[in-house]
Amino acid sequence: MKRHAAKTSKTSQSHRKPLAARRGTARTAAARRSEEVAVFVGTRKGALIYYGDAARRKWRVDGPHFLGHIINHIVLDPRDGRTLLAAARTGHLGPTIFRSTDMGKTWVEAVRPPMFGKAPEGMADRAVGHTCSLTPALAGEPDVWYAGTSPAGIFRSEDGGATWAEVEGFNRNPMLPKWAPLENVTPDNETFGTVLIDPRDASHMYYGSSAAGVLETSDRGANWRPLNRNVEAAFLPDPYPEYGQDTHCLAIHPRNPDRLYQQNHCGIYRLDRPSEGWVRIGRNMPAEIGDIGFGIVLDPRNQDRAWVFPMDGTTVWPRTSPDGKPAVYETRDGGESWQRHDRGFPREHAYFTVLRQAFAGDSFDPMGLYFGTTSGELWASIDEGRSWTQTAAHLQRILSVEAARLS
Amino acid sequence: MRVLIPSQLRSYTRGAAEVEVSGTTLAEAMDRLDAIFPGIRFRIIDELDRIRPHIRIFVAREAVRTIAVPVNPDDDIQIVGALSGG
């Protein structure tokens, strides 16, 4: 079992001014008590945790954790407010999961990280390349987590992340080779998949995947079925197949779990259950911007409000800010209309790419929004997206951003 | 036999660069290594018993690409992290 300890330092909002050496211990402790939000940043070379006050104007950085590891996702357990799970690998070493019960002061490696068993006859064997995403289960299941892997697989832990078992209804499903073929990967030889849980019913879950689109289970993962009606897959001969869509980010509204949104490879969609037909709300984006992107963030207070970060999906699909001018777009009417926000961003020649899990929101009022770029910049808005400040720069490629209000 | 541990894996071996294990095959030797240092095997060998793409293993200075090879008590097993792409 591998243990890690993290370095800790203090910075200003600009990530330039170390403060720890100038402050006494008592003052430091007082400052930490005032910290009310944490932003967890997974990068290609390690993880960082940014602690902010309620105003979210002063930030202290903690880390790096696992310097040199590829941290695909680092997540705080909302059920206890202090347990962290991190999905890690390195360029050389295989994938694993680390767990901390003291907010990252110490880490312990999973005894059995996600790994596939021997495939059923007729199915090709799979080996976990990395864990893409980590999902804590509902409050009533305090030690349960789900993990989505590349190649496509779903794993479940019932002991807080120490051991992981296959969700056999998915991993051994005879349809898996069709839903998520092993060859259906990005140029980095990866696929993406994440589990969402209906907050009303732990047995009702969704799986959003870059290979299969959206799948749904009503029996805790024993059986799954596609849920992709009206979602385009422009890269397939049948542009509206039953499955095979490329879901970049799937989100379920916490107050109205019958409402889902997704940022898909082929646009922005909304679904209102029990309907099974998605509506392409991205059609209402300005034509010159389009509705291509990776992440989508929902307002937990308002089911009609969401933010996206559009990227260029024309010609060879640069997936950078259209025309080199970064902007967040917000809807307040469920996608009927969109408003541009670009205050604080560079005005030109800024080719931001924000990946699938690198855009997040907190639960303050006003709500804070955060995203990380592949060029290693962390941006924050404390006025619900209207204006933006660069919180950190010079990091590595940012793979994931999560924000949590500290208890 | 002696297993030479690269820097990437010494957090598992409490800093040791060399570890003594037993076994008649590389697979047995790696199982023994994992029994002493839990978790180390999966970082270098996947669940299909394949040596991971950016790990090289040399037995008696000969490169091997499978763990189903015999090893002798006086062989050195050298584990190397290679070509991970920066």
Image (cartoon, rainbow, N blue to C red):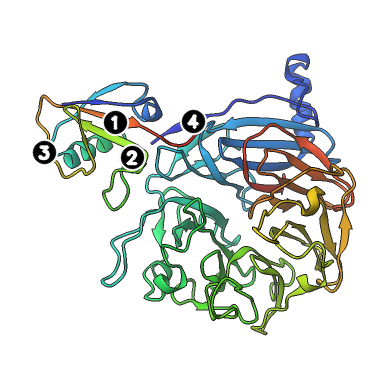
For residue A4, which numbered disc appears in the image? 4
Q: Are marks 1 and 2 on the same chain?
A: yes
Disc number lying in front (4 or 2): 2
Q: Which residue is mark 3?
A: B70
Q: Secondary structure at mark 4?
A: strand
Q: Earlier in the sequence, mark 2 or mark 3?
A: 2
Q: Which residue lies at the image location 77% right of the left edge and 24% below the top edge? A: A16
Q: Secondary structure at mark 1?
A: strand
Q: Chain of mark 4?
A: A
Q: Chain of mark 1?
A: B
Q: Earlier in the sequence, mark 1 or mark 3?
A: 3
Q: Which residue is mark 1?
A: B79
Mark 4: amino acid:
His
Q: Is label 4 in contact with label 1 (beta carbons under 8 Å)?
A: no
Q: Which residue is mark 2?
A: B44
Q: Is label 4 in contact with label 2 (beta carbons under 8 Å)?
A: no
Q: Are marks 2 and 3 on the same chain?
A: yes
For residue A36, which numbered disc appears in the image? none
Q: Are marks 4 and 1 on the same chain?
A: no
Residue A141 visible, this angle: yes
Q: Chain of mark 2?
A: B
A81 to B59, vertically: above or below: below
Q: CA distance from mark 4 to mark 2?
A: 19 Å
Crowding at dot 3, Cα within 10 Å, few <14 / some 14-19 / many 20+, comes out as few
Q: Secondary structure at mark 3?
A: loop
